[in-house]
Amino acid sequence: MEALVHYIYDNLGGGAAVYSQQILENEVKKVNARGLVLYGVIGCSFQSVDKEMWCNYFHQKGIPSINLEGAFQTGAPTGQLMTRVKAFIEMLS
């Protein structure tokens, strides 16, 4: 979770997706993450391609990920989103 916060709020992901991938990999190593939650906005083809690339890359490295898409969310997460994230976390245990 800490890696995700750094990635999003420190704006470390600027530039080509391969640079963001390197930053994600460094963060995964730093916090010894067991998995990745990748989230993008529906309809953004650039994000969709990047997330699929990262999913495949980290899968080959033995790091599971979940690829989620949604709208800009201002309130609490939906039940469906929470169910998917909880199931992913249970799988990591």
Image (spheres, rainbow, N blue to C red):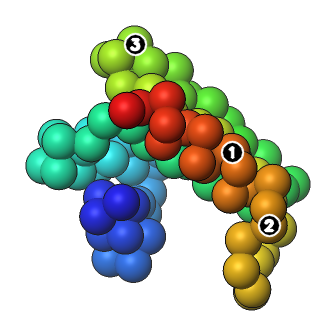
Q: Which residue is mark 2?
A: 78
Evaluate if marks 3 and 2 touch, with contact meaning CB atoms under 8 Å apart: no
Q: Quadrant of the C terminus?
A: top left
| Separation of marks 2 and 1 at Cα, in angstroms | 10 Å
- Which numbered disc, 1 or 3, marks the residue that appears first in the sequence? 3
Q: Amino acid at mark 3?
A: Gln
Q: In the rendered view, does 43 fall on the left or right side of 22? A: right
Q: Look at the numbered disc 3 and give the secondary structure of its residue.
A: helix
Q: Which residue is mark 1?
A: 84
The reply to whether residue 10 is visible in this rendering is yes
- Which numbered disc, 2 or 1, marks the residue that appears first in the sequence? 2
Q: Which residue is mark 3?
A: 60
Q: Look at the numbered disc 2 and give the secondary structure of its residue.
A: loop
Give the image quarter of residue 64.
top left
Q: Amino acid at mark 2?
A: Thr
Give the image quarter of residue 82.
bottom right
- Which numbered disc, 3 or 2, marks the residue that appears first in the sequence? 3
Query: Residue at coordinates 38% horizontally, 49% vertically from top-left?
Result: 20
Q: Amino acid at mark 1?
A: Arg
Q: Look at the numbered disc 1 and give the secondary structure of its residue.
A: helix
Near mark 3 (Cα within 10 A), the count class, few <14, some 14-19 or many ≥20, is: few
